[in-house]
Image (cartoon, rainbow, N blue to C red):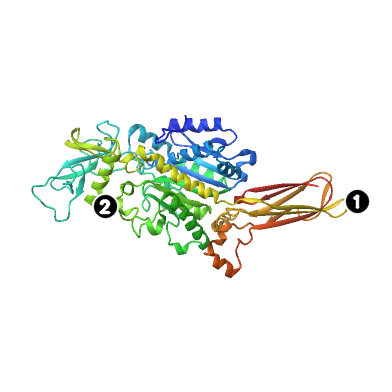
Amino acid sequence: MQYKKNHYFTNAELEAFLKQCEKQYPQLCTLETIGSCPSGKSIWLLTITDRETGSHQEKPAYWVDGNTHANELAGSQACIYLIHHVLSQCDANSEIKQLLGRSTFYVVPRISVDGVESIMTRHYNIRSSDQLWPHKNLLPGFYEEDIDGDGHTSGMRIEDPAGPWKVSKKDPRLMLLREPDDCDPNETYYQLLPEGQLYPDKNAPFVFRNRFGIDMNRQFPTNWEPQNLQQGSGEAALSQSESRAVYDAIVARPNIVGAQSFHTFSAVILRPLLNQEDHEMDFTDLEVYKALGKRGTEITDYPNISVFQDFCYHPKKKFYGSFLEWAYNSRGIYAFTNEMWHLAKKAGVEVGPAVDWFARASDEDKICSMLKWCDDNLQPGTYFKEWKPFDHPQLGKVELGGWKGLYVWSNPPHEFLQEEVEKNVGFVLACAKSNPHVVLHEQNIEQVTSSSEEKISTLRLTVKNQGYLPTYGSSVAKQKGTCYPARMYAEASSGLEILQGEADRQVEHLQGRYANLFERSMAASTVFRSGRSLNAMASFEWTVKGTGTLHVKIDYAKGGVFRHTFEV
């Protein structure tokens, strides 16, 4: 299965693609399952690194995932394009080759595998899992469903003098909310519902119910709350096999420095915090987040915003149990959530805050402009279903129609998928290049005595971190202990004896260029005499007797493992 532009992969296509990557690039790829969904379908993780330069766990790593939310299909496509890009460019693009030589990517393209399967085959609108929640059995009520069998669950309108909706005068395809004083006796008003039907029969109460209420992004243990405080949170933190698989996989890979989780559809880059204002965050980490986020904005044209300060549905409404909060606050991972695509923005329509506009917008001119853009740029019939009468088996005469939201609101239309994933992958690569990178700065062997019977030499080694981030990753990683202390090991071969210098000791982590964040200009650097990152280098010295080999290993945890060999 080869990569296809502007194409949404089915589960079978995704699995075939990943297996083909491992087969075609065995020196770069390792495919494994990190768990399974309730149906038994595998959740795949592809590890990408150049194994000739070291094992994946001995390099700073970057985690990327998609489809935490099943209906946000573009998330998995961004992961797929990342895989395709780095593998296909590894030979031709020396920068990518160098990156894979010093870094590891852990990519989980699709977390909600079962949910995606149901969306693509049964056409349900599923948040994450296709498991029934919060009730294990369907309660009597109204449920969304594709009742005309056309492969879409769009809208359903029913004439009702008390209905809150009416037809737009500017475009009869669109429905508008009535104003408070809108009581024109010559106007037709409607109830507007999702396409669906009453269960178990027409006598069921007209109460809208959601079959599939699990939200995998409310399942993580940091600030987890039960259903009555956080919808979709499940029976307990990590009660879903999919969220547990992600949790276990990340905990088992302590070399992960940063992460991006691909979602849709607000065209923003989200960062912590989720339950507090910025001043409560570690100051250094906040500055790093802002600097990385700025690069993200330059690459994607998405603003980088705090969830708590700029993305909450209501000032008093917080998010609990999210991946983003857990990854940063519990694991010390510089994690971002990329909300890809924004129909209004693409159509050139000015709208309000990232969340607020979609939930509350009813501006007729703006909605008409978006539909006009679709008319001009998309294939007819792919984004809107014309209103047509339908004889509902329970409700009688209704009309079915409205937006086909999956590939126009929730995800980029096929024609615009490639450009959306390309720029987001650019942000992934920028962050991965910012990871710590420990290299040899200098090595020296000085012979102290010339006696063939008792040859004594002094060995000196200096390493430096020429990466942006320190070898411990974030301040929170160091505070929480998810980044273990750095350690140096020296082992002499037969014929060589260490006279001075320790063979096993804890060493200091190395700072990165990020330390210069606080020197905003060259002038400031000159005034404070601090033009380079402090503590970005470390030197080691041994006095040895005899001839042979001294193997040095310095484990910088998230900064990777540095190895060097002296031949004496």
What amino acid is found at the position of numbered circle 2 in the picture? Ala
Residue at 27 percent across and 53 percent down: it is: 360
Q: Nearer the viewer, mark 2 or mark 1?
A: 1
x and y, in percent, of residue 147 in the image: 25, 33
x and y, in percent, of residue 327 in the image: 50, 51
What amino acid is found at the position of numbered circle 1 in the picture? Ser
Q: In the picture shown, does residue 141 fall above or below 25? A: below
Residue positioned most to the bottom: 527
408 left or right of 422 in image:
left
x and y, in percent, of residue 143 in the image: 27, 39
Indicate the secondary structure of the residue bearing disc 2.
loop
x and y, in percent, of residue 552 in the image: 72, 49
Q: Quadrant of residue 393?
A: top left
Q: How crowded is the residue under tag 1: few (<14 C-alpha within 10 Å), some, or many (20+)?
A: few
Q: Quadrant of residue 202?
A: top left
Instruction: State the residue position of label 2.
Output: 361
Q: In the picture shown, does residue 162 fall above or below 13? A: below
Per the rendering, the mark at residue 554 is none
Is residue 563 at least partly visible in the picture? yes
Is residue 139 at least partly visible in the picture? no
Residue at 44 percent across and 31 percent down: it is: 13
516 left or right of 124 in image:
right
85 left or right of 445 in image:
left
Indicate the secondary structure of the residue bearing disc 1.
loop
Q: How many numbered callouts? A: 2
Instruction: State the residue position of label 1.
Output: 451
Question: Sequence order check: which comes first, mark 2 or mark 1?
Answer: 2
345 left or right of 31 in image:
left
Q: How crowded is the residue under tag 2: few (<14 C-alpha within 10 Å), some, or many (20+)?
A: few
Q: In the picture shown, does residue 125 fall above or below 456? A: above
